Amino acid sequence: MQKKYEQIVGWVNEQIHNGILARGDRLPSENELMERFGVSRQTVRRALEELADDGLVEGRRGSGTYVTANIRRHKDEEVRIAVMLTCVDTYIFPAIIKGIESVLTPEGCTMQIVMTDNAVEKERMLLKEFIRTQSVDGIIAETVKSGLPNPNLNLYRELEDMGMPVLFVNSFYKDLDIPHVSMDDHMAGYLAARHLAECGHRRIGGIFKSDDGQGHLRYAGYMEALMEKEIKVRGGQVIWTDTEEMKTMEEEGDRFLKRLKGCTACVCYNDETAYKLVRICQTAGKRVPEDLSIVGIDNSALAQFCPVPLTSLENPAEKLGRAAAEIISGKIRKNEKMESREFEPELVMRSSVRVVHEI
């Protein structure tokens, strides 16, 4: 004889598989289920626990119980994951994609790659399309200008309310309680500045991006290392730039060198910034590392093939991609809890830093 809680489990399963309840829909309340089936609250809760264990529903504190099931996956059809990056063909992004693909492809998942070009408007357009069509089962997203207020956060919340798993990669929005997979950016800035200090530098400038959350975290790490080494922080020798200004950095080389005047070393936001600073120095007749030591972050191909090979902090981009794919796949297929992961960077030493003995 079927147990009472199994009647509720069977009914919810039927509602989901017949399309009456879709992912993101709210189940009837405990009181409504009690009345419908003539059972106790304990029986209802037992049924909801069973459904949650099967990956069909999840409870949200103070809100109710929602459908999380993807009907296609229960029919052994492919799972579709959207990968939304600011760029896909340069810098560390091919490695991120390679890592994601290495996990999703063997699992029979389809990967849909889209680009935001680091533009809030394009991010908004893509998110609205995902909401309208419900054409994907999960989203791995790189944030857009995460150092600035973002008007699209409500769209991410809407996706969550629909039961759509979202995972950020490479950065995150601090105002959203959505897990992320990234390098520990605070540690990257800290290790870069500490390395320069341990090489004897006391006048250490910095170039950081103002419109990316990574830039703020790397700056915080840089500051922590300097204060730990009791090195005077000179605000005038910290340069803040943004995505658009980065494109014309070499054209404005004099401005950067003027701000870094008196510095023997500089921590750069990433390898692209460091690469351009090396070229600015060469154009102005300044030698790297003799006149200015430079550390980049990410250990991209730019670090290796820079005119002066760059000391840089390793961003394990392929590992980030693999971890992101494993986490979102686990959520979709097994309803596993998604949790943030941060990878500690490692210093890769090349030719762009010299040891000095300052008084």
Image (cartoon, rainbow, N blue to C red):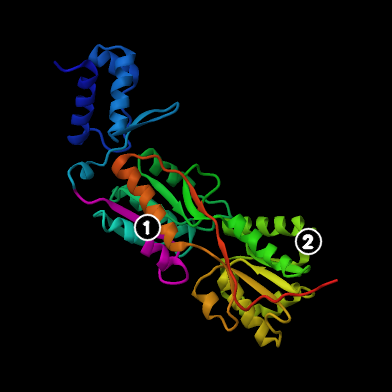
**Closer-to-camera residue (341/59):** 341
* Secondary structure at numbered mark 2: loop
Per the rendered image, the range of residues in magenta is 77-99
Point out which mark residue 233 bears: 2
* Residue 309 sits in quarter: bottom right
Point out which mark residue 310 bears: none
Disc 2 packing (10 Å; few <14; some 14–19; many ≥20):
some
Instruction: Please report the residue visible at 55 percent of the width from the left and 60 percent of the height from the top.
Output: 345
* Secondary structure at numbered mark 1: strand
Instruction: Please report the residue visible at 17 percent of the width from the left and 43 percent of the height from the top.
Output: 75
* Residue 194 sits in quarter: bottom right
- Tell me: residue 64, above or below residue 258: above
Residue under label 1, please give it. Answer: 83
The amino acid marked with disc number 1 is Val
Disc 1 packing (10 Å; few <14; some 14–19; many ≥20):
many
- Tell me: residue 173, above or below residue 7: below
